[in-house]
């Protein structure tokens, strides 16, 4: 699956880099009025530190930095998932001078001999609502993965702790192939399943007990995703009914106190008893670059490691990489974190173990049942249809062999779905169905969503321990559906209301394709069913499909 994601991940990187100045690139440039022979340093970095890094790039630029040969230094910084960056650099579609992922684990993946210098630190934690953490014994008790499992596997859910209204225990972490936090979360679970805090081996990853433990923990996952920020934003927007906990970085807990509304309980950091990892944010200067480029990259590293820059990182919730700087507020209980934690730091295992983590996760993660709903109306003709087909096939390629997929096209008629088929045997069948789609007719969008949702809902009742989802793509507005939008939204919300704590048994993900698609309508539909909505064009539709795939 990692190889299949490579090309798509590269596209995501390019999309990130070219979006907007605030979201894609920041630069420290010379005075435009002076002669300008600049040396540009491209930094591929973990997006978790974007706010801090953007500020430091601006400050660095105001010093008119120069190399030893008196060339002005320009910083071109590109935030992206650490896994995406590895794929882009390996495939040579991104020429970077510096790689600064969230964890040194990704230096192992890129080049086992590569070393970097930490610029900030943040431990991986489980973000929980304070009342839920207290129900498990926080802060007086060190909470373990087994404590999470005890509530997750109890048929009574949170009722066993005197809180029937909280429903079942729901966890989230990012996709380990795309995101550092998801990768380290999986590795921490493997350590716990192997009952080790060091000396992890490939035999430990293959052990039946490790697989069984990982299956139990991953069975509590509602869905995955590409960004820890996504989960934090959703938790703060939707409250405890959305998630019980999410595996994120400590700095995001601190940051949440600037975003939380008064009607929500605070989030706190749980440091698993079995141990956790530091996100050490290494700054690694890549081999093969020119002397001026190396000099410029080193000068920016010196800036980032300066006391002033480190103190500004601390103010944003990171722990300074410079240990001479005391860890003070906001790393404190008033912001839901404990400066004395974590007590047990897990080491990165050898390269052969690092390389096998994702395969172990794929073999044990929660399965997915996905209905692809595809607009084939007349307006899709030509390049839009060709690119949408490519995107849908990229989506298919990212899913695992254990996942099941159905495919239904619609125009002014909702055509009978094909599948669901297990991808281990049916991947080519679904791909052929996508290939054979031709454009024509109208857009019975609401009918198509309603039918796919009903079919998926019936499957969810038979197989509740699977992520059930509808992924719908359309380039236009509904035309001629018998189902009306208010009725569709009411059905989706009503079903959520009947589930414990407002959970969604089937999540709907929507893709607005092109300028004519009604983005707000599609966003409202996705929100009603606990999903996600994105917008794509002929240039980016594959990227959007792959981002949707990160949830499974």
Image (cartoon, grey):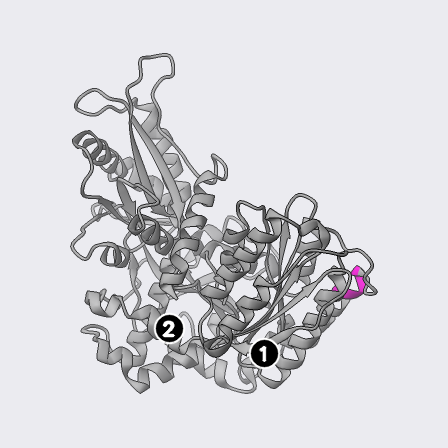
- The quadrant of the rendering that contains the N terminus is bottom left
Question: Rounded to the nearest whole Å, what is the CA distance between mark 1 and mark 2?
Answer: 32 Å
Q: Crowdedness of circle 1 by 10 Å Cα count: few (<14), some, many (20+)?
A: some
The correct choice, above or below, for 319 with respect to 459 in the image is above
The correct choice, above or below, for 360 with respect to 314 in the image is below
Residue at image mark 1? 163
The correct choice, above or below, for 211 with respect to 504 in the image is below
Query: 257 or 88, which is in the foreground?
Result: 88
Residue at image mark 2? 361
In which quarter of the view is residue 491 placed?
bottom right
Residue 524, percent across and down?
69, 56
Q: Which residues are magenta?
A: 485-489
Residue 418, percent across and down?
63, 74
Q: Residue at x 27, y 38 (%)?
A: 304
Determine whether the residue tagged by mark 2 lies in a helix, strand or loop: helix
Please say if the residues under marks 1 and 2 sit with CB atoms less than 8 Å apart: no
The correct choice, above or below, for 543 with respect to 496 in the image is above
Query: 390 or 518, which is in the foreground?
Result: 390
- Asked whether 458 falls inside the magenta stretch, the response is no
Determine whether the residue tagged by mark 1 lies in a helix, strand or loop: loop
Main secondary-structure element of the magenta-colored stretch: helix
Left or right of residue 108: residue 209: right
Which of the two marks, 1 or 2, is nearer to us in this view? 2
Would residue 338 be visible to someone looking at this image?
no
Q: Crowdedness of circle 2 by 10 Å Cα count: few (<14), some, many (20+)?
A: many
Query: 7 or 35, which is in the foreground?
Result: 7
Residue 383, percent across and down?
59, 47
């Amino acid at each position: 699956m990692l190889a299949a994601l490579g090309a798509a991940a590269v596209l995501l990187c390019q999309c990130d880099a070219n979006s907007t100045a605030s979201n894609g690139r920041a630069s420290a440039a010379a005075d435009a009025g002076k002669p300008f022979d600049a040396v540009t340093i491209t930094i591929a970095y973990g997006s978790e530190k974007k706010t801090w890094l953007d500020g430091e790039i601006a400050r660095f630029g105001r010093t008119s930095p120069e190399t030893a040969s008196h060339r002005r230094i320009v910083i071109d910084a590109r935030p992206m998932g650490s896994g995406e960056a590895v794929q882009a650099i390996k495939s040579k579609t991104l020429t970077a001078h510096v790689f600064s992922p969230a964890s040194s684990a990704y230096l192992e993946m890129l080049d086992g001999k590569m070393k970097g210098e930490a610029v900030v630190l943040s431990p991986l934690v489980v973000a929980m609502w304070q009342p839920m953490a207290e129900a498990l014994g926080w802060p007086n008790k060190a909470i373990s993965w087994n404590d999470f499992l005890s509530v997750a596997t109890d048929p009574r859910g949170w009722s066993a702790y005197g809180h029937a209204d909280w429903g079942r225990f729901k966890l989230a972490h990012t996709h380990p192939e795309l995101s550092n936090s998801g990768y380290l979360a999986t590795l921490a679970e493997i350590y716990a399943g192997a009952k080790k805090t060091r000396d992890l081996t490939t035999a430990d990853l293959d052990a039946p007990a490790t697989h069984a433990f990982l299956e139990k923990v991953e069975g509590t996952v509602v869905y995955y995703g590409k960004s820890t920020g996504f989960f934090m934003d959703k938790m703060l927007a939707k409250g405890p009914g959305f998630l019980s906990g999410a595996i994120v970085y400590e700095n995001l807990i601190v940051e949440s106190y600037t975003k939380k509304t008064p009607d929500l309980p605070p989030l706190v950091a749980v440091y698993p008893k079995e141990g956790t990892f530091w996100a050490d944010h290494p700054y690694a200067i890549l081999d093969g670059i020119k002397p001026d480029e190396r000099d410029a990259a080193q000068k920016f590293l010196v800036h980032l490691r300066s006391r002033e820059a480190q103190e500004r990182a601390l103010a944003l919730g990171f722990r300074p990489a410079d240990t001479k700087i005391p860890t003070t507020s906001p790393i404190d209980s008033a912001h839901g974190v404990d400066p004395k934690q974590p007590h047990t730091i897990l080491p990165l295992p050898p390269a052969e173990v690092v390389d096998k983590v994702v395969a172990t996760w794929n073999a044990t993660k929660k399965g997915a049942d996905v209905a692809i709903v595809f607009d084939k109306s007349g307006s899709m003709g030509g390049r839009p249809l060709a690119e949408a087909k490519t995107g849908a096939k990229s989506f298919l390629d990212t899913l695992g062999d254990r996942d099941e997929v159905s495919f239904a096209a619609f125009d002014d008629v909702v055509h009978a779905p094909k599948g669901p088929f297990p991808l281990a045997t049916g991947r080519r069948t679904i791909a052929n169905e996508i290939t054979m789609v031709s454009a024509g007719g109208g857009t019975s969008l609401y009918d198509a969503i309603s039918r796919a949702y009903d079919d998926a809902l019936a499957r969810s009742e038979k197989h509740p321990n699977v992520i059930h989802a509808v992924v719908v793509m359309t380039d236009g507005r509904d035309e001629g559906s018998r189902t009306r939008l208010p009725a569709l939204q009411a059905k989706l919300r009503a079903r959520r209301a009947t589930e414990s704590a407002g959970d969604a048994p089937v999540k709907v993900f929507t893709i607005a394709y092109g300028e004519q698609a009604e983005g707000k309508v599609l966003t409202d539909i996705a929100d009603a069913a606990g999903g996600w909505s994105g917008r794509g064009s002929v240039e980016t539709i594959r990227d959007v499909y792959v981002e949707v795939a990160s949830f499974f």
